[in-house]
Amino acid sequence: MRRLTIFVPLLAACATTARQSDAPLSIPPAVVTAPDPAPRAWGPAGDGLAAADTLPQLDIRPTPEPEAVARIVREGTTNSHAAADLQYLTDVIGPRLTGTPAMRRANDWTAERFRAYGMDSVWLEPWPFGRAWERGPMTLTLVAPHRRQLVGYSWAWAPGTNGPVTGDVVYVDAKTEADFTRRFAGTLAGKWVMTSPPQPVPNPDGPPLTAADSARVRAAIRELYAPPTDSAELAFRQRRLSLIAREPIAGLLRDGAKEFGLVTMSGSPESIYPMPFLVVSHEDYAQFHRVLALGERVALQADVRNTFSSQPVTAYNTVAEIRGSTNPDEIVLLGAHLDSWDIATGATDNATGSIAVLEAARILKASGVRPRRTIRFALFSGEEQGLYGSERYAAAHAGELPKYQAVLVLDNGTGRITGMSLQGRAELHDAWTSLLQPVSALGPFLVQARNKGGTDHLPFLPYGVPAFNFDQLSRGYDHTHHSQVDTFDHAVTEDVAQAATVMAATAYQLANLPVLLPRGQRRAN
């Protein structure tokens, strides 16, 4: 039975919780395993469609254009550039941490590719990011209870050690500030500090998990990270990092929280740590915890060299468009985030999405179709730090957002598109079923009313824009997500080509719909 990892949403698809001062310390992204859901079919049946049976459906259907859609599908499936472009972006340009020269190089390269593919307009949109951070060399050695080299990574936007630092490991398991003061205050100088027990990560080499096993693991994670009901415990959870920061500790330690030595990376310029903060494999973190429980000494030596910019830097979104023939001021936006974490090359998060958007642009231009509305393509930066680039884009374009037909984002790994989640807009079920029907040969597809979070469609929703994130096959995203193996080797290029083709076809049909989709509830000022 194949296993599907489920990320607790507090720090999953993006680092939005980095805006909470203690969240990166107290709530690591959790992983549990469960059986894959059974495949679901596209069409009028399925458990994701129940809401459509009870809500009146809007009578919005694309004008049939079978020849135009056939040209799009033929171009996308027989002449795809997705694999070559994806390889260059990941293997040559490499990791794309926002605020670094590598990210700017990615902006410039994608802009050049949009121009080469014949876009009517291409530009970079600047926005203020904050202080840049770059990872430097790091060595990590276990010196007690035995000596061996370890693999670890600095949490982003944490400082280095200013030379080798050796210290004992201590597990701060205090529940309240009074407990912390009594047991730990004044004792942490020079220590490497753990603040949580190991994640419940089942043994991947053990017996296959049953549904009951998975339910127990999920329950353990919920219990572990549920907000305390006791007011004193809640107050301490919120102040824990600031209390620990008063002590001259060596640094913080975090569980990588995945199988096979993989780790999960995050961080943000809005949560710059005052001390080194290291992520180690779940296996090593669990060992530290077990040995400490035996009353034995655990000690580490780390040499970490990171750098910060002295001043805030400017980041950029790459934007291009095919101008609409009759309603150019109305816009369909295809989007993905171009930035990535820097411990791999950001292939599935989210070079695959960015290349699908780039390839959709190429397909539309090469197929010779003429959209009535403008189709715009945006590759956002700063997503991994908290959706910053798309937030800035939405704010900068607020005046034109009432004329946005829709925003369609791809950011769930390398897997092929399997349908659409409607962000609760169940009344659009039939409309989206109609949009996907002309490309049903690339399915199956499922349209469902559920909400999705954690990526760049979200900043558009408060403006009332119909904004969606395509559903995709997981294709091992539980392992590659934010990890050191997020490389081209794990990309499924034929799935990226499928996704690009589906995005191109749906964008074209949305651009030619007789009417604008109804606005959602507006919450932005």
Image: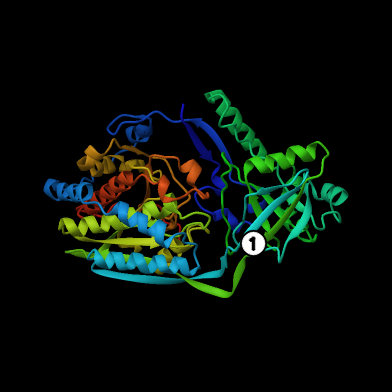
Give, as a three-letter code, the residue at label 1: Ala
Depth check: give the residue in front, 523 or 216: 216
Looking at this rendering, what residue extends furthest in the left direction?
67
In this rendering, position of residue 269 left or right of residue 489: right
Is disc 1 surrounded by few (<14), some (14 to 19) or many (20+) residues within 10 Å?
many
Locate residue 292, reporting x and y percent: 79, 40
The residue under the point 48% across, 46% down is 480
Question: As rendered, which of 333 and 11 lies closer to the eye?
Answer: 11
Q: Nearer the viewer, residue 307 or 439?
A: 307
In this picture, residue 443 sits left or right of residue 87: left
In depth, the one of 29 and 133 nearer the eye is 133
Q: Position of residue 31 (x, y in %)?
A: 56, 39
Q: How is the image coloured?
A: rainbow
Tell me if residue 430 can be seen: yes
Residue picked out by circle 1:
158
Q: Is residue 292 left or right of residue 198?
A: right
Residue 153, quarter of the rendered image: bottom right
Residue at horizontal 82%, vertical 58%? 189
In the rendered image, residue 286, in percent from the top left (x then y), is placed at 69, 39
Secondary structure state at the residue bearing disc 1: loop
Q: Residue furthest bottom?
A: 311
Judge left or right: residue 277 versus residue 247. Answer: left
Q: Position of residue 467 (x, y in %)?
A: 37, 52
Q: Residue at x 54, y 45 (%)?
A: 9
**Count of all numbered marks drawn on residues in the image:** 1
Residue 465 visible in the current orientation: no
